[in-house]
Each structure stands twice: as structure tokens, then as C-alpha cells.
Image: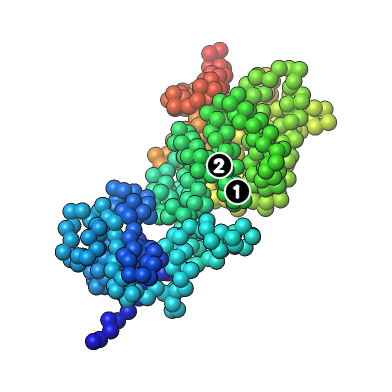
Amino acid sequence: MSTLRPIDVQLQRPFSVDGQPASRLAVWLLAALAERAAGDGRVATVSAPEVAAQLGSTAALPMALTRLFAVYRTASIEVGWGTEFDLAPATLSLRGRSRGPFWVAPHALARLRFCMGERAATPEEVARFAGRRADTGPARAAVSAGTPLPLVADDLDRWYALLGARQRSEEEGPTRCTGPLQALSELRLAPHERLARAWRQFFVARHARRAGELDDARRALRALVRELTGSADPREQVALALARIGLVWCDHQARRLTRAQAGLHQLSLEAERAGGAVWRVNSRIACEFHNLRALVTRARLVEGRIAAGERPAAVRAVLADLREALICAVESDAFTLLESVAANLGYTLWLLEPWLPADVARQGTRMEAIRWILLGEWLCQRHGLAAGSPWNLINVCRVARGAGQAVGAVSMPLARVREKVGVTATLLGVPGRVRDWIDLTATLAESALAADTDYTLAQQAAALLEHAWQLAGAGRWDDFERCRAAVLARLPHLAPMDQRFFRREIHSAGAPAAH
């Protein structure tokens, strides 16, 4: 009697079954069945919900099974479904296939030879690929003792795919969310890959928040907090902390400042308790916390929600938080954090200039603010995304014209700013084409009005507002009215606090026309 030849199943990309290209799902099901086989002749099974979890969608299961079983037929692997294990798979009704459970007879299972590239896979590698939870036995003991679990290429491959999907979402910009979110949501991660799944959900939520989809961001972040609360894993605690900070970001972005302040106060209390070391020691988390707390307090100051008697202490608290955030960003060597904190520090120096304490305020604060904002933009373009951040140049234009300060503030000549800021002057455009602020704001307005703009609605309104101010200063009132109408058209979609701000600013810009 001849022995049936073995069937190779490749656990590394490119996945294959019997030398033929196969999906990860086709390989995973065979590995899961092999890992669960007890070796005593009993049939191992995998449920339909477990297979659907690999897809992330129950609706996608029937079509996926059609492709999966086509691979098995080509390789002559008899995988069955249902509970009649004594029947040949070829005789089973297709009508009930999507309900599972799925199985393979022991004699067919014995033909499978799992491989990691050119060598045979170890039982541990098969088990890890199949998704055996590491919460019992020697594996859990190794984690408790601080010994990392061994990695296999497929595990690293999924982290590679996660980082790739994240970068695509960053490069597409905050308003083009369909493709990037689809790339993140279609990333197949098994239920046991909880940490990778947590980061995927965090990236999706952050992308939604930046696009202004705050309800979607909150839902995703709250689900993530529920999932990770109580975890003793230090890596999961980091993801949990950032998710909780993300919820406060949503409140700040929606201008729910009282709620944001309460959330930050709760987090600061937890940082001082037992188990709060992650808030104090992790540089990234500390940077995010102090940066956000500075912005929330700054917004409350600007909105007049802090009494005059409490204002000096609040201003000092904002500057102290930004200093701490800057130090933490340097510690973490994260240029994205440095860019954000530097830009926030610059704009804060200008917004709070009337209230700065005597030992901080000094002549030329406006130029100091512009220097910091341009430093942030420089870091953003060199080490983040090549397009930079629209807010940085918008805020430079605001500071330069003296927005938000006492009546009579004189606009700073663009040539003088170029002379003072040094190397970052190149970010203000080529001198031959950008001769004055109106040329720079025209470029920002053009980007805001483009059909494929990656500016958020708030950024669009802000860019158009700056150009409207320059048009008014040049006496181009017809162009000003068109720009004004574009600003007003965007206001219904903004938070009430932002609506009030833009209405007040656009009215002030047009005031000379009434005289």
C-alpha cells in the first residue's frame, strides 16, 4: 500500500498550500485544526464564528469560504463541516457550510507538513500562528517572569501591515478618510492579537478625530478603554492611557472645556496613585498629557472662563505644562511631538501675551511666537509629513497681523520676519513670488478651496479668514465679500465656540468697509 505524499503548508508570506498561492485564512484554518488535534483519533473542530473573527466580518464569511475550499480541493485536502464527522466532505450539503464547525479527518491531517520558509515549523510556531492564547501554562509563566514570547515571521508581518496602514492614513490627510480607514479596518487580526488590535483601533479613532468625526472617535476609544481596563500588561497600559487621553482630546476639540478639564484632573489624580507610574515615566504619555492640559487651560483663559484673580496662576500653569511637554518630547526623540509642542508654545506666547508674567514677557514676544511656530512647521516638514500642518502657517499669519491683541496693533512686514527667523524663512515662500502676507494667505486660501483639499473645515475657515483680512487691508472689497461668504458657508458645521470666533473675526475684518 503506497503512502500518500505530504502536503506542505507555508506559514510565512507568501502563504501557500501544496505549492499553490493561498490566503492567510486558508493557512490559518489548517494550522488551527492541527494545533487542536489531540492525537487520540478524535476530530478537531473550528467554529464558524472563529473563522469570521479572522475576517473581522460575518458577512464576508460565505465568499471567503468559497475561495478557501477551492484551495483545499486543488490540494486534495478533505475539510468538512457540520457534525457528521463520518461522512466524506464531498457528500456534505453546501447549504450549511457557512454555519460550520469545520473539521478535517485525522488521517488527512497527518499529511499536512507546516513550514517556515525552507524548514519545518515547530509545534510552538504552528500554535502561535493558529492563535493559541498565551494565558496558561509555560507561555504565561514566561510572560510573568518578564521573558518575551518568541516571535514568528507572521507575527512581525502583521505588525508591518499595521504600520503600513497607519502611514497611509497619515499621508492621505485628515479629510480623506475612506481609503486609510478601509486599509486599517481590513487588516486581519485574530482575537488573541489584542495589543495589535488595540493599536489599530486607536489609529482609526485618532484619524476620525482629526477628520472631525468626533462621535466615531469617541465610540472607538470608549470600546478600547473597556477592552483594556484592568490589564496588568505594561504595553497594554500604554495603549489604554493614550486612549483615555484621546477621549479628552475629543472634548477639547468639541470645545467641551469643563468636561475636558475634569477628565484631565481625574488622570492627574490617577498618576499619583499606586499603579500610576505609566503616566509619570512614559515620556510620550506625559508629553501628550501636559500638551493637552496646556491647550485646555489656554482655551479657558481666552474664553474668559477663568476669573481675573486666578488668571496669573493659570497662565503660569500653561507655560509650565508646555515646558514639561517640550522636555518629554525631547526625551522621547519623537519629532511629531516636538513639532506639535513647539507650534503650540509659539501660538500660546502670542495669545497670552497680555497676561504673561513680568519675568516671562519681553520685547518682541510676537517675533518669538513666530519663531517657535515656524520651528514646529520646519520639524513637521522635515520629519513628519512633507506637506506640513496648515495650522502653523495660518497662525503665523494671524500673529504677524496682530490678531487678538489690543486695537491698533500694526502688522509686521514680511521682509522683517524673514530677516529675523533665519533658516525657517524658506517656509514663508519664495521671496520673488511671495512678496507680502497677502500672497501667502492667497496660497492658503487656494488650498482651502481646492476640490481635493486636505484641510479640515476649521482649517478652511481659518485660512479664508486670514486671506479676507489681507484683502480688506488692500481695499479689494469685491474679493473680500467672496472670501467672507466662503467663511460663513463653513460655519454651520463647526462647534458653537468656533462659530462665534469666526463670525466675530470676519465682522471685524469687514468693519472698514462700513466707513
* Mark 1 and mark 2: Cα distance apart in space: 9 Å
Q: Residue furthest right?
A: 359
Task: Provide residue 223's location: percent of width, then percent of height.
Answer: 48, 39
Per the rendering, the mark at residue 466 is none
Instruction: Please tell me whether residue 322 is drawn above or below residue 187 in the rendered image.
Output: above
Most foreground residue, 261 or 62: 62
Say if 303 sits above or below 178 in the image: above
Across and down, in percent, residue 88 comes to 19, 67
Residue at image coords 42%, 62%: 130
Give the number of the disc on residue 229. Answer: 2
- Foreground pick, 176 / 249: 249
Any part of residue 20 in sight = no
Q: Nearer the viewer, residue 227 or 442?
A: 227
Relative image position of residue 406 (x, y in whole percent)? 69, 20
User: Left of 358 or right of it: where is 33?
Assistant: left
Asked whether, in this view, residue 207 is left or right of residue 331, the answer is left
Disc assigned to residue 232: 1
Q: Amino acid at mark 1?
A: Ala
* Quadrant showing the N terminus: bottom left
Residue 50 relative to residue 373: left or right: left
Type of the residue with mark 2: Thr
Inspect this view and state whether residue 30 appears: yes
Q: How many marks?
A: 2
Q: Left or right: where does residue 94 sit relative to residue 112?
A: left
Task: Count residues near mark 1 (Cα–Cα under 10 Å), then give few for <14, some for 14-19, many for 20+.
Answer: few
Task: Tell me whether the residue at label 1 lies in contact with that at label 2, contact meaning CB atoms closer than 8 angstroms.
Answer: no
Q: Most extreme residue toward the bottom, as rendered? A: 1
- Quick one: SS at disc 1? loop
Secondary structure under the numbered disc 2 in the rendered image: loop
